[in-house]
Image (spheres, rainbow, N blue to C red):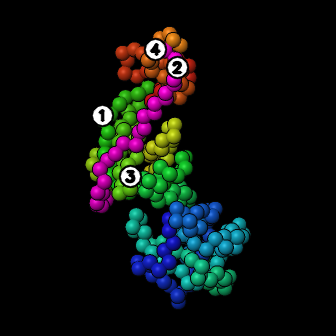
Amino acid sequence: MSDTNGSKDSNQNKEQAIVGYLHNLSPIKTSKSNNQYFDLQIQTSNEVYRTVCFSPDKHPLLKRKLESSSPIKIHKYQLKKNERSGENDLILNKRMKIEDPDDSETDFDYVSVKTETTQATDATTEEIHDGAAHTLINIMGRLTFSGSKETLQVKGKTLTKQEAIFTDNTRSIRVVLWEKDIPRVTTGTCYNIKNVAVKEYGVTKYLTLTRHSTIESIQIKIDRQDTSDVKTETTQHQFPPDGVNYVQQFLKCNKCHSKLVNNTSKIIKCSECCRLPN
């Protein structure tokens, strides 16, 4: 995320102030361009704004206002249309001014704001690979099925899985679709998908949908081809020739690294950790 100061598609609002209550204040973060920022929501009398603030010194004040459920009045802000949601985001920078509103300006009540969608942050696939696992993100790009659907036994249940690759104009990432999420998408189609879970397998990130995920078909141009980010690692050990009695090749569990019995079954279950190795 970068500072939007001076952006051509941002409208400076110097006259009309915004009055509202604060919700879901994040910690201070640092972008790849080394800009500090944090996000929150501001509930006004008629809508809730997703807000990004590029003035970290305002964080303590806003935190106090949030904890006391006190309204604030903001001058010198920017409204910028979010290309993903189509709604206006509120952009705050160092030029903004915060003050306490008059009682006549807060003729509306503090109401609870859901956090399911606001916890997710917009991200490119490159940012996902470089970021943390176990987070929620929003993505835009092309989804392509990889191979055919598989039927697996997971915790005593028969589940259908579809592997896929999600590509935007920065990179590709693996996606695992389960059960009812599979018919929600069509291979080769571009989507805006919100509330996607970032998982990790070994050191490799992948994505899966959640019960809060929303999927919207969109028309965007993706110039990149799908690429696989699965890495094959080879470990080499050097021994003198007379120190080698025999060489053995076998499958091992990717979770507990125990030797697997190689049989003709398409699905192999580890006898040590009793889990599916892939």
Mark nearest the camera among 1 and 4 is 4
Please state if 158 lies on the left or on the right of 146 as rendered.
right
Disc 3: which residue? 171
Residues at marks 2 and 3, CA–CA distance in whole angstroms? 40 Å
Three-letter code, disc 2: Phe
Which label is found at residue 239?
Answer: 2
Q: In the figure, 155 relative to 68: above or below?
A: above
Question: Reading the chain from its start, which is encountered first: label 1 or label 4?
Answer: 1
Q: Give the range drawn in magenta.
A: 216-241
List x then y, in percent, for residue 180.
38, 41
Which label is found at residue 148?
Answer: 1
Question: Reading the chain from its start, which is encountered first: label 4 or label 3?
Answer: 3
Mark nearest the camera among 4 and 3 is 4
Asked if disc 1 and disc 2 are in contact, CB closer than 8 Å, the reply is no
Question: Reading the chain from its start, which is encountered first: label 1 or label 2?
Answer: 1
Please state if 274 lies on the left or on the right of 191 as rendered.
right
List x then y, in percent, for residue 275.
51, 25
Dot 3 lies on which element?
Answer: loop
Mark nearest the camera among 2 and 3 is 2
Q: Which residue is drawn at 52% across and 37% down?
A: 202
Evaluate whether residue 138 shows in this view: no
Q: In the figure, 53 relative to 169: above or below?
A: below
Mark 4 neighbour density, 10 Å: few (under 14) some (14–19) many (20 or more) = few
Dot 4 lies on which element?
Answer: loop
User: Is 222 covered by the magenta stretch?
Assistant: yes
Judged from this view, the residue extending furthest toward the bottom is 15
Residues at marks 2 and 4, CA–CA distance in whole angstroms? 12 Å
List x then y, in percent, for residue 137.
48, 54
